[in-house]
Amino acid sequence: MKETTATTTHEGCRPSEEIENLVIVVRADPIICGHSTEARNLAEAAISMGIGNVHIVSYPLDILEESGLPLKPIESMTPYSTGIQVDRPAPVGDYKVLDGRLAYGISGHLVDLLHQLEGKTMLMDLYLVPHGEMVMNAVRSFDQICSNADVITVGEAVGSDITNVVNNALAEEKIGAAQVVLSNYLSHDVPVAVSQFTKDLIVEAGRKVDVALGSDFARQLNERVQISYPAIDTASYTSLEDNPDFVEKTLKERKLDEDGYIMFLSRIAPAKGVDDLINAYKTSEVYGHKKLVICGNGPMKEEIIAMSERDPHIRVLDDVSDDEKGVLMRGCFAYCLPSKPKTEFVETFGIAIAEKMLAGGLGPVITTTTGGIPEASGGHCLEHEAGNVEELRECLDRVYFMTDEQRAEISDSARNFALRFDRSEILSKLLKLANPSIC
């Protein structure tokens, strides 16, 4: 099998010294997804760093509303900064095109953008499947008629976007699909993964395909894939320390007392362990003394509401805005994300954990060592075995009997660790990976 190289040659190319345009393809807000948050943060960092043209390319709102994906209330979304253009191209083609209409719409829009933009463009896709195909189809088409194309592609994989396809393809002996997704990933100039855990998953997926095909994917993936942790707006969380009036006002509007509640905030799904948290909470020392506030949306929401609707100490909030999130994290007695591995999902980083660590306050993080979570937490948390309700209860009890000084010590070390995920630092590293000449 021919090895995919890291660069693309264009006849007569005159590359810009600096990247002047950033285009990101992603399932953007209002989807509740770490990638939508990361895309926003990369875009905002690009504007603050002086990149002139920033586009987020995503899906039409009506398509998202019909998709069944968990969504934030649109009115709760924080506006993007001036200079960031959110493009939602309409599907192309009629009913005969079947599933390709959205892909054609987005790929075609990317080609139109590349024709319009001047200077070097970094074209990045978050969540490789299906966005990697959309991006590389657009670039191949653009290259055919533009001898001076100045585009560098970055493909960010979360893990499940690759392993889901590869594992299902191998199980069903449809190895061609596995080859397609790995080849697409490696066709990007800069393939990155959101954690070392994610990279290891992807390399292992490549090894499985190599066994079946006699190919060389695992070696190429191991050599070329770089680690790029999710980008976080650290200042929006750390600055809460200097705005106690806003914190107090926001908590009051939610009828919550500072340090008066245990908090869960993430997608409400089986792999997130929300049911484990409710069961552990009800048998813990903290029950009745601190509320349990579950924030989010997702496929398990109705089940969680049913588990908690007769309990006066448990609340479920599905309308937490971007502005409120950090405040609720800062004000909580403890933040819990008892994530556990499931066939359909494994936590490959844990953005919400890092966000809580940055928000500060006295409340420590309680979580597991599932997947890439240790790379997000750095161990500055209380950990329990995934799926072990008894150990989770013990963690709640430990926090309940801690002094404020003990909790503050964990919280302070956690914040210092999480500062490394600042969006400007993450984008700077990506730009350094992308900046070598592509000609």
Image (cartoon, rainbow, N blue to C red):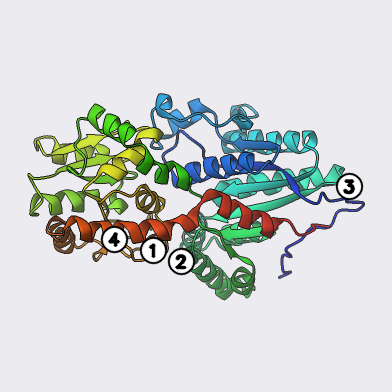
Q: Secondary structure at mark 1?
A: loop
Where 124 falls versus 229 (above or below)? above
Disc 4 residue crowd, few under 14, some 14–19, many 20+, Cα 10 Å: many
Give me the C-alpha separation between circle 4 and circle 1. 22 Å
Residue at the front extreme? 242
Residue at the right extreme? 12
Residue in view at x 67 percent, y 54 percent: 431
Where 59 falls versus 181 (above or below)? above
Q: Earlier in the sequence, mark 3 or mark 1?
A: 3
In the image, 275 versus 77, the foreground residue is 77
Query: Are circles 2 and 1 on residues that touch, CB within 8 Å?
Result: yes
Disc 1 residue crowd, few under 14, some 14–19, many 20+, Cα 10 Å: many
Inspect the image, locate mark 2, and give the three-letter code of the amino acid beneath it. Phe
Residue 126: x percent and y percent?
56, 48
Residue in view at x 32 percent, y 39 percent: 327
Q: Nearer the viewer, mark 4 or mark 2?
A: 4
Q: Of the numbered discs in the image, which one, if any, rests on residue 197?
A: 2
Could you say which quadrant of the image residue 111 lies in?
top right
Residue tagged 3: 147
Give me the C-alpha separation between circle 3 and circle 4. 55 Å
Give me the C-alpha separation between circle 3 and circle 2. 39 Å
Residue tagged 1: 371
